[in-house]
Image (spheres, rainbow, N blue to C red):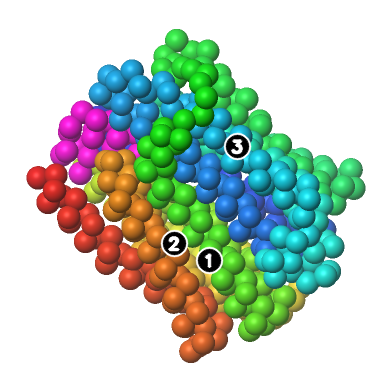
Amino acid sequence: MNQTRSFFKYVSQNILGQLGVSCYILADTFFIAQAAGTDGITMLNLCLPLYNLIFAFGSMLGLGAATRFAILKAQGDQRTHRYFFNALAWACLLGLPFMAAGLACPEVLLRWMGGGPEIVALGVGYTRIFLLFAPFFMMNYIVQAFVRNDGDPSLAMAATLSGSLFNIVFDYIFIFPMGLGLPGAALATAASPIVSVLICSRHFFKKENGIRLEARLPSARLLFQSCQLGVSGFVGEMSSGVTTTVFNFLMLGLAGNIGVAAYGVVANFALVAVAIFNGAAQGAQPLVSSCYGRRDRSGARQLLRLSLGTALGLAVVLYGVVFCFAGPLTALFNSEGSALLAEYAVRGLRIYFAGYLFAGMNIAAAGYLSAVDRPAAAFVLSIVRGLAAIVVCSVTLSALFGMDGVWSAFGVSELATALLTFYFLWRERKTAA
């Protein structure tokens, strides 16, 4: 199989898998909107940064350790087998604070995120349940990344889609026929990564399996080596959380709960967009790392060009769909028929999604830099994109232009980051030459 065919095989399967994850979040939002209306969407949007933080740790551990695995495997280095168990062990350890918070103080977290008394009362049970399952979300990232990097992207995709389908079906069953309400939605979401891990575990019984579970004490050194290459995944997830948190507080000041609910609609569709571009970047990563491990620089650069072109093409199609169907998309979550929510969300979708014309390429470039063992460049790029630029732009532009400034901040920050992206890619090419 030539490199271009391999690229589109890995990327398409990984995008489908990641879309499955985003679809269950959309289903969560849809069912919660039907069960609790605008307050339900507001509550869920306040919880999204907590999800992002959990996913960020899982992404950093999974992508980082699996990238190390792929590079060392291509070099024939026996140290490849140390990383899998170490990542799983650290997922359990890093999940403990989330579990403690879920048991002790979920209402405090919701208040910190800006929830009023009615939102806190609505969301305590939901928040407690998903925090208690934090280690499973992280382990799901790890197992899928290793299975994909060990040459089985089809199984990783099937596992993700199966977990997502389970979540969608049981969301409905738990919320409505069983009458569990919002805690039922959290329970379905929390169980879905367990389903995914169980399906991925089939890989370990195949004769092609190259992953060994070597039980050792958790190693901080291996964790650091993994996190170096997984930091772009961490910051990528965190950027969604930071954006959501900052936008939530700005929207509360500008338009109250209805503004947060409108942003909740935009944020949920933004998760679909991020899933598409993360899927493309993560799908290309095993191939790029393999080329890098074999010292095939031209092959890695070809994959970079394919990644950037694919990201731009997907962004154009995505923006066209969102621009044309912003109204019907908003109506899916506007169960109370609020004209103000519809007005805010439709305009927000059309302005906000223009930013993905640059964001897609930024995500692809950060993934490439991690895959070729350029952790410093990937880290700087991810920090600028995910934290510095978006915070500065959103605060500044909201003060100047109100809600339109909030919506446009994402695109402006991604454009600024794109300039830095192409500088890092130029410098990486000069260094490799």
Q: Residue at x 61, y 58 (%)?
A: 49
Please tell me the numbered disc located at residue 42: none
Q: Residue at x 19, y 50 (%)?
A: 428
Q: Position of residue 193 (x, y in %)?
A: 64, 36
Q: From the viewer's perspective, is residue 196 above or below residue 378?
A: above
Distance from Cα at disc 3 to Cα at disc 2: 25 Å
Please tell me the numbered disc located at residue 93: 3
Residue behind mark 2 = 386
Instruction: Identify the secondary structure beneath mark 2.
Output: helix
Distance from Cα at disc 3 to Cα at disc 1: 27 Å
Span colored in magenta: 282-301
Residue behind mark 1 = 243
Q: Is residue 228 left or right of residue 244?
A: left
**310 or 74, nearer to the observer:** 74
Most distant residue in the top direction: 207
Q: Position of residue 76 (x, y in %)?
A: 27, 19
